[in-house]
Amino acid sequence: MASLIEIRDVAKVYKVGQEEVRALDGVSVSVEKSEYLAIMGPSGSGKSTLMNIVGCLDTPTSGSYLLEGQEIRDRSDDELAAIRNRRIGFVFQTFNLLPRADALHNVELPLIYAGIPARERRERAVESLRAVGLLDRMHHKPSQLSGGQRQRVAIARALVIGPSIILADEPTGNLDSRTGEEILEAFGHIHGGGNTIILVTHEDYIARHAHRVIRIRDGRIESDERVPVGGRQA
Amino acid sequence: MSRFSFGRRVAEARVKFVEDFRLAFGTLRANKLRSFLTILGTLIGVCSIIALVSIINGLNRYVAKEIAEEGSATFWVDRFGIITNAEEWMRAMKRRPFDAHDYRSLVEGSTTASEVTARRWRQEGVKFRSHRLERIGILGVTGGYEDTHSLAIAEGRHFLREEADRRQAVVVIGYQVRDEFLGALDPVGKELRIGGRTFDVVGSLAKRGSMLGESQDDLVLIPLSVFEKSFGRSDNLHFVVRAADSSPEGMETAQEEVRAIMRMSRGLAPGEPDDFDIVDSKMLMDLYRSFTGGFFIVMIGIVSVSLVVGGIVIMNIMLVSVTERTREIGIRKAIGARRSDVMRQFLVESALLSVAGGAIGVALGAGLATLIRVTSGMPVQVEWWSVAAGLGLACSVGITFGLYPAARASRLEPIAALRYE
Ligand SMILES: Nc1ncnc2c1ncn2[C@@H]1O[C@H](COP(=O)(O)OP(=O)(O)OP(=O)(O)O)[C@@H](O)[C@H]1O
Ligand SMILES: [Mg+2]
C-alpha cells in the first residue's frame, strides 16, 4: 500500500541573480498515516522549503510528491486549494492570522472556503477554540492576544476542518519554553486523535515528543531515525 | 448524484458570497475617506445621468404639452420661420415684409382655412392710474383670434370682430397684468393706458404659467388696427391659420393652399423660392427633438468620460489594495481559497465601491431633479429606468475595471504572497 506522503528525489532551486540556491537537493522521504515526525536542522538547511512543498504551498523544481498515491504536480490550482483546505492543516511560525478579523472569524475561515453555512461554521469554530482553551478570547483580534494565544488560534484554525495531516513550521519558535510546552501538549492530543503530524523545530526537547526525527543539512537528509519509545515524552 | 452536487455548489457559492459582501463592507468602512474619493467619478457620472434624464424628459413632456396646446390644427405663416443661424436670419431680413394685401388675399382666397388671424407684437409700458408696468407684451390681433389661439378667458370676454373692425380701443389683459394692477378687483370696465391711448378692459385671461422660466402672463391683447394706429407698421406682421380639417391630410392641404395664395399675392414667378415660411407644431416638435437629441449626445459624452475616469480611479485603488493585502491573500490561499474565491472577493469589493458611488449619485441626482421642479415648476420627474441604468452602469464599471486587479490578486502564488513584507 502506498504511503500517505511519498517524496522522491525532490529538489528546489531558487535563482537569485546569477546564483542558484539549492534549497532542497534530492530529498526522498515517506511518511505513513498517524506518524509524528520532527524535522530538524540548522537555519537555512531547507526545512521550511520542504514543509511548504509537503503542504502544497509551493512546488518542487524537480522530483515527485505523491499524496495518498496521487502526483501533486498533476493537480490543478483548484485541486491544490481543496487539498490545502480539507486535507492539510498548516501552522506557521509567524501565526499568519488575519489582523482585522477576530479569533472566531480567523478559525471560521477554512470553513468558509469549504462552503459551510454560517450556523454550522460557528459551532465548529467555537468547538475548535474550546479545544485549544480560548473560548473566552474568541472576540479578540490577534493584536489583542498574546503570542501563545495567537498560536493557539492558528492551531484551532488548522484543526477546525478536521484535516488528517497537520504541518507545523516552528510553531513554538516565537514563544517562551513554557508556552511552547503547552502548544506541544496540544499537538500530543491531536496526534492521539489519529492525525499525522510533521513538525519543524530547532529544539531537541521538542523533537523528543516525536516518534521519528529527520535531520536536514544543506538541502539533503542527513539522518532519519525512529525514536525508541523509552526516549519519548508523553 | 449530479443534482445533489449542483445544489451543494449553489449553497456553497451563497456562503462565500455573503462572506465577500461582509468583507467588502468592512473594507469600505475601514477606509471611509479613501473609498469616498474612489467613488467620486461614478458618483458624478450617475448623478448626471439621473439629473439630466429627468430634466430632459420633464422638458419633453412640458414642451409636448405646450405645443399641443398651441394647437395641432393651426399653423403660422411668417417671414422668418424657424431661424437657427445668422445666415437664415440675413436671408429672412431681405424678404419683403407681409402687408395688408397678403392678409386680404388669404382671408378671401382660402377655402380650407376656418380662420386667419394677423398679428404684430412688441413690448411697451402699460399704465393703470399711477401704476406702470414696463415691458409688457402687446399683441395686436385681428378679430376672431380666439379661434387660432388657445387663450382661456377668466373674467369678461374676448374682444369682438366688430370692435376690432371699428378700431375700438379695447383690451384683454393677461393674468399677471390683471394681478399686479387690480388684485382682487373686477378688471372689466377698468381703463388702461398703452402707448398714449386709453383702452377699456373687456376681459382677462386665465393663468398660463411660465415656460422655461419666462412668464406667459405678462401680455395684453388689442385689435391689430388700433395697434397699427398707435405703433405703426414696423413690427413684424405674421399670420396664424386654422385649418377647417384638422387631420394631417387636412393640415397638408390647407398649407399647400396657403402657400399658393401667398406666392400669388407676393408676385413670385414659378421656380422662384418662397419668400415666407410655414411653421406648424409638428415642425416645432421636430426642431425641439433634434435640439435635445444633440443635448442627449453631449450628455452621453459627459457621462461616459466621468464613468471611465471613475473606473480608472477604482482600478488604481484596487491595485493598491491588492498590493497592501498581499499577505492576506497569501493566508487565504494557504488555507484553501481558490483563484476564483480571491477573484470574486476583489470583484465584489470594486463592484460595491462603484455601486455605492452610483447610489449616492442617484440620491444627489434625484435631489437635483426635485430642486429644479420646485424652483422652475417644470414637470421634472426621476425616471425609474434611469435609476436602473445608472446603478447598472456603475456596477459594470466596478466589475470591468476591477477585473484586472482581481485577476492579479487571484494569480498570486500562495508562498510568495505569504513571504511578502
Ligand atoms: N524565495 C527564495 N528565494 C531565494 N532563496 C530562498 C527563498 N526561500 C528560501 N531560500 C533559500 O533556501 C534555503 C533554505 O531556506 P529555508 O527557509 O527552507 O530554511 P530553513 O531550514 O527553514 O531555515 P530556518 O531554520 O532559518 O527557518 C536558504 O538558504 C534560503 O536562503
Ligand atoms: Mg524555516
Image (cartoon, helix red, strand yellow):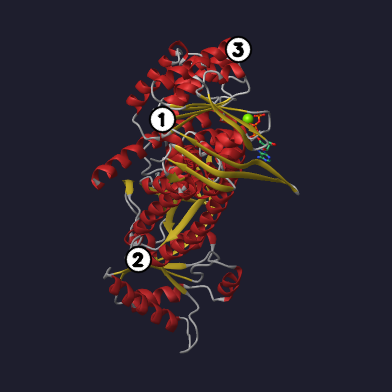
Above or below residue A200? Residue B40 is below
Q: Where is residue A60 in the image (x, y as percent from the top left)?
A: 57, 45
Asked whether B54 or B74 is in front, the reply is: B54
Q: Quadrant of residue B88?
A: bottom right
Above or below, B11 against A144 in this view is below
Along the horizontal axis of the image, is B131 left or right of A79? right
Label placed on residue B74: 2
**Which of the image's four quarters has the C terminus of chain B?**
top right
Label 1's element?
loop
- Circle 1: residue type: Pro
How far from the left and from the top, in percent, is residue B216?
A: 44, 49
Q: Where is residue B365 in the image (x, y as percent from the top left)?
A: 48, 41
Residue depicted at 48% across the width and 40% down the height: A6
- Residue underneath mark 3: A177
Q: Does the residue labelled 2 lie within 8 Å of ligand 1?
A: no
* Of pointers 1 and 3, the one earlier in the residue sequence: 1
